Amino acid sequence: MNIRIIIILFFTILIAAACSSTRKAVDNGSTSSTEHEVVILTEDKRIEFEFYFIEGLKQNMLGNTDVAIQYFNGCLEINPHSAASLYELAKIYATKGDVVSARLLLERAIDINPDNSWYKLLLARIYQGTNQIAKASNIYNELIKNDPENVEYYYVNAMLLTNSGDYKAALNAYDQLENLMGYNEQIAIARQHIHRESGNNKAAYKEIEQLIETYPDVPEYYGIMADMYSEDGNVEKALEYYNRVLEIDPYNGFVHFSLATFHFKNSNFDKGYEHAKIGFSHHDVEIETKIQLYLMLSNAPADLKIEDEKILTLIECIIETHPDDTRSYGILADFMISRGKLNEAREYIGKALNINPNSYELWEQLIILDNQMNDYVQMDKTSSEAISLFPTQPFLYMLNAVANIQMKEYEKAINMLETGELYLVDNKRLEAQFALNKAEAYYSLSNSEKAFAEFERVIETDPENYIALNNYAYYLATRGEMLEKAEQMSSKVIKANPNNATYLDTHAWVLFKKGEYRLARFYMDTALQNGGLENAVILEHYGDILFKLEKIDEAIEYWKKALELGSDSDTLQKKIEKEKYIEEGINE
């Protein structure tokens, strides 16, 4: 039979169901009693119905759901009691997320054809998705009555009841399943979980005891028992069952992990490390499990942490057992970063990239490390290489631009940003970062008009971008332009960041340019109290303010302090020599 014949046969079966699933009320003395009968359509109506139904199915398969809805509605106009049409409409609405319409259509379809399990299954899923667990469970009970040998119905019903917290009904469902299937490990463990959740620990222990009696050579069940005793604080019994696992399977890597966690939890660090090292050395333990324990150890409070040397040994075990997994070197790189060893971290990320050069995340991490190390030449090189591999990733273009701005290659930075902007897709935060970097590049090229236009774009896109607000205000103050606007922006920044020395310096500088020297000094004093004494620009500005307040000797003192910190100001040396304030140069 060829595919075309199969499709036609499939549609024919569906149409037959759609045409025949109707009913009419029978007056037998009860208003709720109904009987089903086939509606006899005229030949023209039958052909019209078949056309609409087939077109509805076809359009739905092609993804034209709105068109499909129109065709199925046409079916219902011809035959309002077509359960199949109602069901097809319900499926479409469910896919669209309109669960209310889907539910109403399915309830009507089931009322017409109460024996169709597909209708009921979809309705049960909708009830489940809208947290109407009792209704979903009732449907599964109906399905079980109609098909008592279907194991899946029992399982789903039991899980539904468990998740809803109706533990008594869930246990009953699992008992029914056990009557059908016989004693089953999955059922026993599911019941154990329910007993633990409901606080019936005695019954939970009994379930696992029965599993151990039935399957005495399976180490996992001893492990479950050990974990329960450990959770309940019974150290002696927990250790007894962990050791029984080792007796059955001495090379079981997983039990060594359990024992490691157990001993660490009970502050027996040497014993815990001993088992951890064995577990980390096992090839049969997934890397995810090892990473989880590593993270637990590396993020432990200071008094619970083991020595760095031991942590490194565990990481080396991961690399040895998973040499082809980039995460092995990634863990080592993260460890080095946390210890401030950025050069070593960069080396290990490079090794991870040798394993998988197509990992975008690793390239991004490597570029960010270059930035943290202030190695802008390498950052430019690394980001360019990454762009060649991932040409549609806009963040890479921005990182490359950052490197070029730091190297004073402003034209190149702007070109890179303009290229990267082509790949921005509804990412307002990144769009703002692009505009901010373009603003800095344009200002460095003495193109204040374009720079300020970009700053405006940043603020429009991200009104809480304090870096943009601060820098824009500072540049306006330096130029003596729109000082009221500059003050409004810097006021907003320091209100949100009252202890940021750089932002306080900008606000003080705006006030200085407005001639409000006493108020400027107040904000500059606050900046000095928040780390400004280590900032040459802030010290020079403080000297400028003191000079305007006629405190000449103090002003010279702070200018000299700024010079000692390595200030690159064009006017600072002249201020000290001439013992007077000299206006800063304007970028234009």
Image (spheres, rainbow, N blue to C red):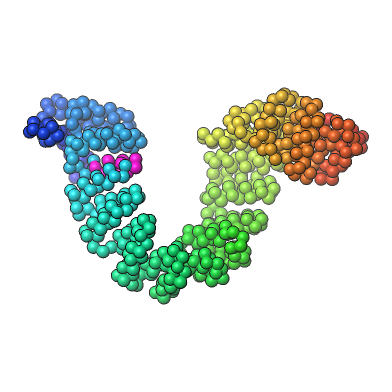
Residue 255's quadrant in the figure?
A: bottom left
Residue sitting nearer the eye, 268 or 569:
268
In which quadrant is the N terminus drawn? top left
- Left or right: where 219 falls relative to 118: right
Q: Is residue 510 above or below residue 166?
A: above
The picture places residue 112, in percent across and down from the top left corner, at 18, 35
The residue at the far bottom in this view is 247
- Left or right: where 543 falls relative to 135: right
Could you tell me how many numbered marks the image carries? 0
Which segment did they paint magenta?
120-131
Residue sitting nearer the eye, 422 or 172:
172
Residue sitting nearer the eye, 58 or 229:
229
Question: Residue at the spot x=58%, y=47% of the render?
Answer: 364
The residue at the far right in this view is 578
Residue 351's quadrant in the figure?
A: bottom right
In which quadrant is the C terminus drawn? top right
The picture places residue 110, in percent across and down from the top left corner, at 21, 38
- Left or right: where 19 falls relative to 583: left
Can residue 345 be seen in the rendering of this structure?
no
Can residue 95 be seen in the rendering of this structure?
yes
Question: Residue at the spot x=33%, y=66% of the render?
Answer: 206
The picture places residue 357, in percent across and down from the top left corner, at 54, 52
Question: Residue at the spot x=52%, y=54% of the render?
Answer: 356
- Left or right: where 269 falls relative to 25: right
Q: Is residue 547 above or below residue 234?
A: above
The picture places residue 462, in percent across and down from the top left corner, at 59, 32
Q: Is residue 452 above or below residue 186?
A: above
Asked if the stretch drawn in magenta spans residue 550, the answer is: no
Question: Residue at the spot x=63%, y=58% of the render?
Answer: 336
